Amino acid sequence: MFDPCASGQCPDSKPSAPAGPCPTQALIIHSAEFPAKKVEMDGADGAPIREMITARDGAPHFAMRMFEIAPGGHTPWHKHPFEHEVFILDGEAVLEGEPESRPLRPGDAIFVPGNVMHQFRNTGPKTLRFLCLVPNPVS
Amino acid sequence: MFDPCASGQCPDSKPSAPAGPCPTQALIIHSAEFPAKKVEMDGADGAPIREMITARDGAPHFAMRMFEIAPGGHTPWHKHPFEHEVFILDGEAVLEGEPESRPLRPGDAIFVPGNVMHQFRNTGPKTLRFLCLVPNPVS
């Protein structure tokens, strides 16, 4: 298994991380402390993203991000070669897909395989929050 | 990037998955529908696990699991070569580590690098729930 510290390939860690080329203890950061970035993709509307754990922290295999989607907002209707692993935290949503749309609720775990069309839509009156994990080096 | 469907290495999918060797649409399963398995590790006390997305679903790179830890319970005090990416859903907890213990709260994102000692302890009166993702083939 790839070990970024043993291989010397560890990327820079965050300013909040311990000194040294790789983290030597766990990093803990509350999700609200991460800046919410606008998603720069066609078809993404009201869907900022917080990139909480990425390769910059020394994470070797996958990245943890959070989307916060305003009422009426959505992620792009698209597909890509890599998978998503999603967990719905709060709100009401629909997963658009082929051949059908399906409702989502908090506590749902969703595996979107690579090359499968998908879109997450906020269908409720409050913010939709979900985690969306992707393999490196996507993030 | 590894594509289990293109390579023909896709493992069996769950009974709830669409027919065929690999899922061709997203899988959606509520976390409460997964059986909670006892963790068979020395030092794990009151810490059942639900394995929500694993290689059996065709997930090629990493697995999503949920721990539900009873008041007073904890995961093992241990280390291993692979990393954890954790998200605290509900409850009060402490992350035991070296050189110190640190409190955790809902919304915390935690990166535990490989080969770093760690233990999650429920320090509150209610169930502690957190997601814990690991690279394949750990799960």
Image (cartoon, coloured by chain):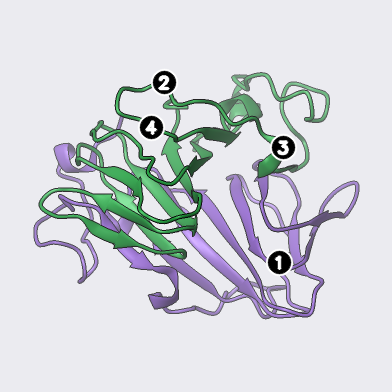
Chain colours: A green, B purple
Q: Secondary structure at mark 4?
A: loop
Residues at marks 4 and 3, CA–CA distance in whole angstroms: 22 Å
Do callouts 4 and 3 point to residues on the same chain? yes
Q: Tell which subunit mark 4 falls on.
A: A
Q: Check residue A45 in the rendering and tell me which mark sits there, or answer none.
A: 4
Q: Quadrant of residue A22?
A: top right
Q: Amino acid at mark 2?
A: Glu
Give x and y (percent) for residue B13.
22, 61
Q: Tell which subunit mark 1 falls on.
A: B
- For disc 1, the neighbor class at 10 Å (few under 14, some 14 to 19, many from 20) is some
Residue at 28% from the left image edge and 52% from the top image edge:
A95
According to the picture, the residue beneath numbered tag 3 turns out to be A33
View extreme (front): residue: A125
Q: Amino acid at mark 4?
A: Asp
According to the picture, the residue beneath numbered tag 2 turns out to be A40
Give x and y (percent) for residue B111.
66, 43
According to the picture, the residue beneath numbered tag 1 turns out to be B76
Q: Quadrant of residue B51?
A: bottom left
Residue at 21% from the left image edge and 50% from the top image edge:
B10
Q: Tell which subunit mark 2 falls on.
A: A
Residue at 58% from the left image edge and 45% from the top image edge:
B82
Q: Is residue B137 visible?
A: no
Residues at marks 4 and 1, CA–CA distance in whole angstroms: 43 Å
Looking at marks 4 and 3 on the same chain, the residue that comes earlier in the sequence is marked by: 3
Residue at 60% from the left image edge and 48% from the top image edge:
B84
Q: Amino acid at mark 3?
A: Glu
Q: Is residue A102 visible?
A: yes
